[in-house]
Image (spheres, grey):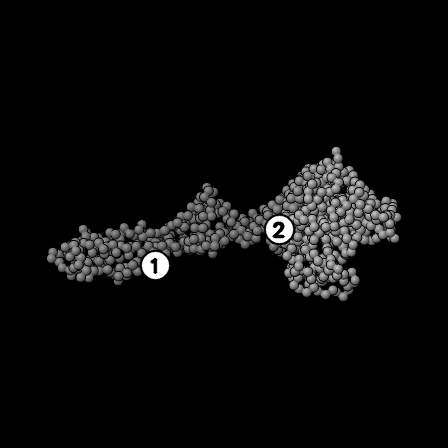
Amino acid sequence: MNRSQEIRGIIAQRQPLAEKLVEIETGLSSLYGWIQRLEQERDRQLQHWSGDEPTESKLQQLEFASFKQKVQEQLGSLHRLQARFSRTTLNIGVIGRMGQGKSTLLQSLTGLKNEVIPALQGKACTAARSTICHQPGNFTTAEIQFHDHDSFLEEVIIPYYTKLGLTPQPSSFEDFVHSDIPPLPSDRDQTKINIYNRLKDDYYSNGKKYKDYLGRGYLTIQDPSQISNYVAQKYNQDYELINHECLAVKHVKISCDFPVHEIGAIALVDVPGLGDFRLGDESLVIEALAQEVDFILFIRKPSKDRANFEQSDTKLYDLANKALNDLPSRSIFVLNVDQNGENQASCLSLQQDINSGKVRMPVLDCVIADCSSPDDANTKVLQSVLSNLSSNVTELDRNYTQKKIADLQASLRDFNQQLQLVKIALPNIDDDEISNQYEDLFEEFWDTITNEMTEFQKQLMQNRDDPDENLKNQIDTVLDDCRKNVQMPSLKDIERRRNKLESYASTYDQYLQELRTNLSRKFLDIEQGLTKTIEQIKATVADVLVEKCGLGGLSESRQSQFLVEVANQIPPVPEYTELKKGFEILSEFNLSYRGLIQHRIRSQLNGLTPDLTSRPKLGAKAQDILDSLEEEYKSTIYNCEGALTGFLSEPSQASFAIVEEFADRVLRAKNAKKEWKRFLRSKRHQIWDKFEKLQIQVNAVQDWSNLLTSVTAQIEQLEQSLKQL
């Protein structure tokens, strides 16, 4: 098996692990959401237990912030690990301070020239993080990823303001470009002045020149000569930046054919050099190493006169060590020797410092190589990297994964212990105490309703033979209308009708029928009086139940509609037979004119029926017809009035009867009390204030318990996934 096959094998072994990590990351993200909901529910619970100091204290002591922070950190760690294992390449990071030969080594390893990876004297060249991939037989191409306005502000501009203590910070890119940069604070030093000038001269002054590139997403470049415009910073003879587009670049992916094909599925990650007052370099190093790098090459070129490591070297090592696990087993130091060997002695001295441990920057190997020599780069540097990758990286990956999983398992155990405190945060509500309180309140209710309804029945009994005022008033109104609004024909009308029918007798009969029909229609309005009385009796019963018996919480409706809604609330099951029937009988009861009075009125209309009344005398004229019509009409109204007099007490008697029927059903039936007790138990929180609050707390405890059950289930599911890893 050659090197290329070994590398593909390593990548293939990572894929199932990456898929499992996606599952664990999803579960952990879900757990984070549950913890957030638990925290929100805790805050909601505090409102339900206001005044209960012990419970409030327990709830306030529950601490979720640290667990949320741990989960966020582990999510970030797992995401970076999953991203690393999902890649189709093994990535080698190349880092070093400005001017150490990093870009030169990349040229030697990739075969790329200055037009793509500039390695020039003077100012720092690399502008953006680049990933260079080996694509056999492929032309050199680049995919440019630009910042959007938000990422540019947060990742590039705000760090300057924070580092320099500039206030106020811009709220948007447009705010940064169009507002004056705040002056430096008085405690500035030369370093801060240089950093401030970089912010002002490059990013602020040229904002209008590069802003059109922000938010452009991705750009593919197939002309190698154009790539460096986005990868490197270029300056004119006055040290002014001339390719402003590079400032908007977030990442560059370059594909090309590496000289050594045995390299296989390898990619090189180039990170901007340090030391040019360009903020964000350190965060770029950490981000690149944590997310994209499996192995690191530290590049250092000592001068011929000085053979000492500097503080900046150890700082760079420490940065890498923060980002990449097992750095001593994932890194090599490359000491860049001049072509003419002038700094050979210095390189040997530094190599001795590394190998002896005099300088504490442990690595797998320390190689002296001429970075400008493709032969040195590939035989000394690259071969050392490939040997160590094939022998170490799989074991390192698994060990690091197991460590992360162990950390996560420990966090889950800690959270489970915290959940024990969460479970006992709310008090147990004593069912017996609730039941006893209900028993007492129900007995008070039963005494009240039996007394109030009995008293009301007594009153109705005393008045059941009294004339009903509503009916009497409505009858008076109808009779008055009958007398005042009579549609009698005129003499002219009678003559016209007679001419049409050719008979006074026929004319008389037809007018009788019209008068009877109109009169019968007017008497229909008597039903309004009957309806008003029954609605009043229903409203009175509803008032007794609401005002006297305290059942108003069952419905917001009042009067007769209250009875309808209570009837609808009572379940149609045998356990509520009497109670439901009583409310239905009362709420549906009506007195109708047609059923009670109409047949008696119809019998008094005979005087206006042709076959049942006398005819005008033979030879009668129009005036005789009119006189007869008026006489019969008045006589009929008189007869109707007499017939109605005997019915004035009917509504009173009906009212007494329906209320008595209602009371018998809901108070005196065998199971009436039991049905009330069962029904009101389910409605107690709507009727009595103390049960309303108690029911809210009961529901709150149940919500709390359900949420804890969901959180526990999520933890158990996550633990199972971890065991299967």
Residue at 28% of width from left, 60% of height from top?
Answer: 481
Q: Between residues 103 and 713, which one lies in front from this camera angle? A: 103
Closer-to-camera residue (160/203): 203
Q: Is residue 581 in view?
A: yes
Q: Which residue is mark 1?
A: 469
Toward the viewer: 225 or 716? 225
Q: Is residue 31 visible?
A: no
Measured in 3D between alpha carbons, the distance from the residue under mark 2 to the one under mark 1, in whole angstroms, is: 60 Å
Residue 527 locus on image (x, y percent):
33, 54
- Mark 2 and mark 1 lie on one chain; the one further toward the N terminus is 2
**Rendered image quadrant of residue 170:** bottom right
**Residue 208 appears at what percent x and percent y?**
65, 60
Q: Secondary structure at mark 2?
A: helix
Taking the spot 72% from the left edge, 55% from the top edge, the residue there is 233
Q: How many C-alpha atoms fall within 10 Å of the one at disc 1: few (<14), some, or many (≥20)?
A: some
Q: Which residue is mark 2?
A: 41
58 shown above or below 477: above
Q: Nearer the viewer, mark 2 or mark 1?
A: 2
Residue 441, percent from left and from top:
53, 51
For residue 308, side relative to residue 146 (left or right): right
Q: Position of residue 449 (x, y in %)?
A: 46, 52
From the viewer's perspective, tell me whether residue 573 is left or right of residue 63. left
The residue under the point 77% across, 63% down is 188
Query: What secondary structure is marked by label 1?
Result: helix
Q: What residue lies at 88% left-to-right and 48% top-to-bottom?
A: 345
Q: Give amino acid for label 1.
A: Glu
Q: Quadrant of the N terminus?
A: top right
